[in-house]
Image (tube, rainbow, N blue to C red):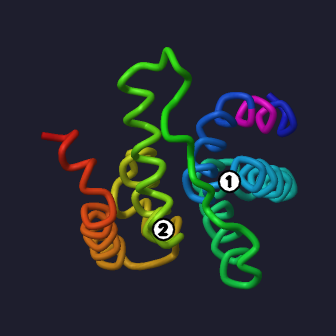
Amino acid sequence: MTDSEAYEAFVAAWYPRLLRAAILISGDRHLAEDVLQDALIKLARRWPKVHTDPAGYVRTTLYRDVATRWRRRREFAYGDPPDRADPGSSAESDLKLMFARALARLPVRQRAVLVLRFYEDLPVIEVAAILRVSAGTVKSQTHAALKRLREVAPELEEVST
């Protein structure tokens, strides 16, 4: 398989998952698509060097680009998801919307930690490598994010019990 074919196979396999993570971190589908596209272009340019862990490279790039945009320009605000999914939606869809609204109330780094730890199901060490922080920082950020989530979204506590 050539480098080009391997890159295309990676993008085809991982795009939906990476897009969902980008949306959860950024809070805006359009921004997420832009940031993911930029990350995939960067990946294509560096493919020979990072082909052994392309998902990690893209995750790191996504987080850093979203955080940079947020810090420098404050160019986006996490939009409010609708109160309910489509009229015939399931309780699971409503729960996802409730979680998205709660996630919207967290700072970018805390959102990123929760998305990487629980949506992407990555171990602490991998999250630390992606965010370029220590494992202890990941643990403390996870703790702080979960505590903040409980404060800003008590309705999630009711759902989980």
Give the residue type at disc 1: Asp
Q: Residue at x 81, y 33 (%)?
A: 8
Pointer 1: what residue?
A: 28
Secondary structure of the residue carrying tag 1 is loop
> Up-down: is 155 above or below 76?
above
Quarter of the image with the C terminus is top left
Q: Main secondary structure of the magenta part?
A: helix
Query: Residue 69: image x %, image y %?
Result: 73, 74
Query: Residue 159: image x %, image y %?
Result: 22, 39
Q: Residue furthest top?
A: 88
Give the residue type at disc 2: Ala
Front-most of residues 32 and 106: 106
> Up-down: is 98 above or below 14?
below
Q: Which mark is residue 129?
A: 2
Q: Residue at x 47, y 40 (%)?
A: 97
Secondary structure of the residue carrying tag 2 is helix
